[in-house]
């Protein structure tokens, strides 16, 4: 993978792809303001490049806020809550840029199979397989044929992937070493603060370390 040089154009493109008013993390910054203050883009690009060179990032940007949303009225059962983690906008902007560069590297070297329809750019995700299934079903019904099918339900990767394997995958696919080391350092700092009904359940300094799994809201997570 070619070395990553972050420019103002990268900032503009990353912010353009992001929703304007998505709930922010600890930095409290909405993408709308980041898009509007164009004078900050050059400075932000330089700081991102420095962070890559130093292979580190402040813990402020690697800490999320996990809101526990109850699925029903039974609020005593932890499994009845849907955790939604909000990450800092600055961190998501940086990982969006890195995700685009890694995706370009994977595409140009044909690392990802063409049959992989989910979690890749310029694709329709699950819509394409659903359309294929629909067409097959109509053909089978029209021709009065039998059909046997099977679906495999994988364990949720967001909750179970060990960080050691993520680092190994980055190495196997020859992601640029500076990016690889930077992401490895960030993984070691991933943490979150639990929040219930708008109230934080712990102080900011007592956040929970993420030792397995990945942040679902991170732009890098799908890839």
Image: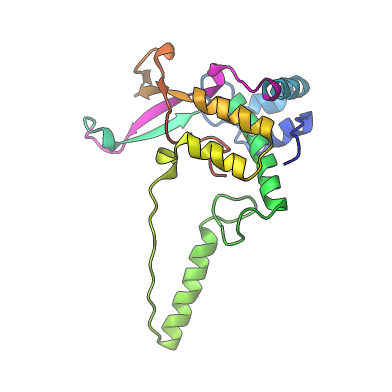
Left or right, 183 with respect to 155, comes to right
Left or right, 168 with respect to 37, comes to left
Residue at image location 48% in from the left, 81% down from the top: 139
Q: Position of residue 200 (x, y in %)?
A: 37, 18
Q: Quadrant of residue 98?
A: top right
**The stretch drawn in magenta includes residue 54:** yes
Q: Is the residue 66 above or below the residue 151 in the image? A: above
Q: Is residue 51 visible?
A: yes
Q: Quadrant of residue 60?
A: top right
Q: Which residues are magenta?
A: 52-74
Q: Is the residue 29 above or below the residue 144 in the image? A: above
Q: Position of residue 18 (x, y in %)?
A: 62, 36
Of all residues shown, which one is farthest toward the bottom?
Answer: 143
Residue at image location 44% in from the left, 37% down from the top: 162
Left or right, 181 with respect to 147, comes to right
Residue situated in front as seen by the camera: 129 or 164: 164
């Amino acid at each position: 993978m070619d070395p990553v040089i972050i420019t103002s154009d990268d900032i503009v493109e990353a912010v353009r792809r992001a929703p304007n008013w998505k709930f922010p993390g600890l930095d409290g910054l909405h993408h709308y303001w980041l898009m509007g203050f164009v004078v900050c883009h050059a400075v932000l690009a330089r700081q991102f490049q420095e962070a890559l060179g130093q292979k580190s990032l402040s813990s402020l940007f690697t800490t999320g806020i996990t809101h526990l949303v109850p699925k029903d009225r039974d609020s005593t059962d932890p499994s009845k809550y849907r955790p939604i983690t909000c990450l800092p906008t600055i961190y998501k902007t940086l990982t969006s840029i890195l995700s685009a560069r890694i995706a370009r590297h994977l595409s140009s070297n044909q690392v990802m199979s063409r049959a992989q329809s989910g979690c890749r750019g310029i694709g329709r995700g699950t819509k394409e397989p659903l359309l294929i299934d629909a067409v097959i079903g109509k053909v089978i019904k029209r021709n009065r044929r039998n059909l046997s099918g099977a679906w495999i339900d994988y364990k949720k990767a967001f909750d179970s992937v060990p960080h050691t394997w993520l680092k190994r995958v980055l190495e196997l696919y020859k992601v640029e070493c500076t990016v690889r080391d930077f992401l490895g350092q960030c993984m070691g700092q991933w943490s979150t603060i639990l929040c219930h009904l708008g109230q934080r359940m712990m102080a900011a300094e007592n956040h929970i370390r993420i030792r397995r799994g990945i942040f679902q809201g991170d732009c890098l997570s799908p890839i």
